[in-house]
Amino acid sequence: MNAAVARIFTQKLCLVGDFGVGKTSLIRRFVDRSFSDQYLSTLGVKISRKTLVLAPVTLNLVIWDIEGSTRFKEVAPSYLQGASGAVLVGDLSRIETLHNLRDHVALYQRVNPKGIMAIALNKADLMPYEQVIQWQQYLWSAHPQMVCIMPTSARTGAAVDETFHQLSQHMIQTALQ
């Protein structure tokens, strides 16, 4: 019998953020390796799947793309329940979405107190580098419990895989404990 049997985990991961921050685009970039300028609003939740081999573990991610409307707060607890991790998404070109991350963090932590979180500062390709770094540093000081706070671009693919991989690694470490 083979002593190096790979373990397989299935984990739920949610993308949370305001309307129009690029949650669906980040998922498309990560799962399908594609990007579209055409905006499609998510109604309710859209579920995607992606398998990662993170030796010696295979991780089957079930990714929930949750709508970002104001209606979201009413249904969020049921969508977030059972998630092992979340990518909280803010749009660097819309400052109010970055300030609203605090509310998204609090909601996720209330539903999943042991859940693991990362922040994606999306649309980094549209902003001056200095501004991106300032926001990254500010959010690190406000949310030191994050696995990572990454400036991402769904358009170019910058740091998208890294964000999901870092979060996934921490989800696996937690599952193995």
Image: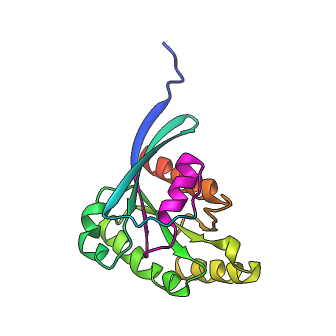
Task: Establish if 132 lies above or below 51.
Answer: below
Identified at 60% across, 48% down, the residue is: 33
Identified at 39% across, 81% down, the residue is: 103
Q: Is residue 23 magenta?
A: yes
- Residue 2 percent across, percent down from the top left: 52, 16
Task: Establish if 134 lies above or below 46.
Answer: below
Query: Which contiguous range is marked in magenta?
Result: 12-36
Point out the residue furthest to the top here. Answer: 1
Q: Nearer the viewer, residue 12 or 46?
A: 46
- Residue 11 percent across, percent down from the top left: 40, 47
Number of numbered labels in the structure image: 0
Q: Is residue 79 magenta?
A: no
Q: Quadrant of residue 106?
A: bottom left
State left or right for residue 167 relative to residue 64. Answer: right
Task: Establish if 86 lies above or below 68.
Answer: above
Task: Establish if 121 lies above or below 46.
Answer: below
Q: Quadrant of residue 137?
A: bottom right
State left or right for residue 16 relative to residue 93. Answer: left
Point out the residue furthest to the front here. Answer: 38
State left or right for residue 101 relative to residue 56. Answer: left
- Residue 162 percent across, percent down from the top left: 63, 55
Q: Nearer the viewer, residue 164 or 31?
A: 31
